[in-house]
Image: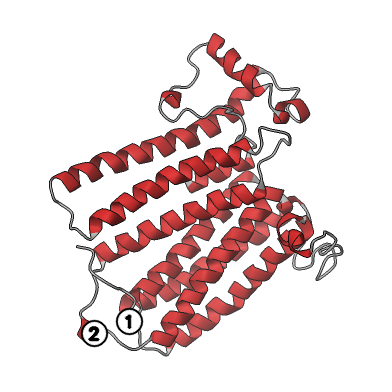
């Protein structure tokens, strides 16, 4: 779902559907008359008037299908989650502690749909692009939902250890949570890069067009706007955060080698380092090649792999699993 949302963004398809019909909007246009009607609605948007004014209905279909697939998948996920959840709760196949977790997942999914439409609406008014603030919020909530589901799932696969086996490794766990937090912040900074299309600027590495710090990173006033609205600053921040991860995660890996970790925790640490190498390679390649859609999508997927490895590592560290999920 996250990857499809990224492709929808990268292909400029996100504003092709100008109405939000959560129940009745399941079916796409089925004949030429319906396609013309949907296209006519799109022709009234700023994106068509200012950017895609040359587009005909056949070209419109190429961007429509990405956004349609993204919305349809969201509905499908909701159905395949809700129906079994209600059945399992009604037949008491899940414990009392699991029920609120499942309900929370479904509620968060519904809120994500609302936030997605709130994001799209920002590009249907005056400017032909969505707000980078709303885009990043939409992406950030997707990552949080994914992380929450992953954590609950890990608790089911690997139940909490007995109290006698806990203890030790508290400093290492704090370091691991720091890594998780830094990865999440880097993900959010990537959302602002995508929202401002900052990846199409400064397509050199390691310098930004020959400079360590590009000119004009604090040209906006007030100062805080630069971190969210200035293309140079947004890309610079993303590079700085990625560089921090480049040092922080290998140090964590090195310290973990001496900690006598259990096998799954050691596996998590190794996967974390490998995911970092993959993600940095994808990020640099995406930048140098001017953001080709396949690479950019892989870079977004790599971010989730890195986040997954970090959460798995925290969960598998001694004392990292808390509470029963029965």
Measured as percent of width and height from the top left, residue 51 is found at 76, 30
Is residue 295 visible to the viewer in this orientation of the structure?
Answer: no
Is residue 289 shown left or right of residue 308? right
In this rendering, the answer to whether 97 lies above or below 272 is above
**Which residue is disc 2 drawn over?**
165
Screen quadrant of the C terminus: bottom left
Q: Are marks 1 and 2 in contact (CB under 8 Å)?
A: yes
| 46 left or right, relative to 40 | right
Kindly tell me whether residue 313 is visible in this rendering.
yes
Q: Residue at x 53, y 64 (%)?
A: 184
Residue 321 in the image, given as x and y percentages of width and height: 30, 73
Q: Residues within 10 Å of mark 1 (few under 14, many from 20)?
A: many
Q: Nearer the viewer, residue 138 or 241?
A: 138
Please give the residue where the numbered disc 1 appears in the rendered image: 318
Tell me which residue sits at (84%, 68%) in the image: 211
Give the percent coordinates (x, y) of residue 210: 85, 66
């Amino acid at each position: 779902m996250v990857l499809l949302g990224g492709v929808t963004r990268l292909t400029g398809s996100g504003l092709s559907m100008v109405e939000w019909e959560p129940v009745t909007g399941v079916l796409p246009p089925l004949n030429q008359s319906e396609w013309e009607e949907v296209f006519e609605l799109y022709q009234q948007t700023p994106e068509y008037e200012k950017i895609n004014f040359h587009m005909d209905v056949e070209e419109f279909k190429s961007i429509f299908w990405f956004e349609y697939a993204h919305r349809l998948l969201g509905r499908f996920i909701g159905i395949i989650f809700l129906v079994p959840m209600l059945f399992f709760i009604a037949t008491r196949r899940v414990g009392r502690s699991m029920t609120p977790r499942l309900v929370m997942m479904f509620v968060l999914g519904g809120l994500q749909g609302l936030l997605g439409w709130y994001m799209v609406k920002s590009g249907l008014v005056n400017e032909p692009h969505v707000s980078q603030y709303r885009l990043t919020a939409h992406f950030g909530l997707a990552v949080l939902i994914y992380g929450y589901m992953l954590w609950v799932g890990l608790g089911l696969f690997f139940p909490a250890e007995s109290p006698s086996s806990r203890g030790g490794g508290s400093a290492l766990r704090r370091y691991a949570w720091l890594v998780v937090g830094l990865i999440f912040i880097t993900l959010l900074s990537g959302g602002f890069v995508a929202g401002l299309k900052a990846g199409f600027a400064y397509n050199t590495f390691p310098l930004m067009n020959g400079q360590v710090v590009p000119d004009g990173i604090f040209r906006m006033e007030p100062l805080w706007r630069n971190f969210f609205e200035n293309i140079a600053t947004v890309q610079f921040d993303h590079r700085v955060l990625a560089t921090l991860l480049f040092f922080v995660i290998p140090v964590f890996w090195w310290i973990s080698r001496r900690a006598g970790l259990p096998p799954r925790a050691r596996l998590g640490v190794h996967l974390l380092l490998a995911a970092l190498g993959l993600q940095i390679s994808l990020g640099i390649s995406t930048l140098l090649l001017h953001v080709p859609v396949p690479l950019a999508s892989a870079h977004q997927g790599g971010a989730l792999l890195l986040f997954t490895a970090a959460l798995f590592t925290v969960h598998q560290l001694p004392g990292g699993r808390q509470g029963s999920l029965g």
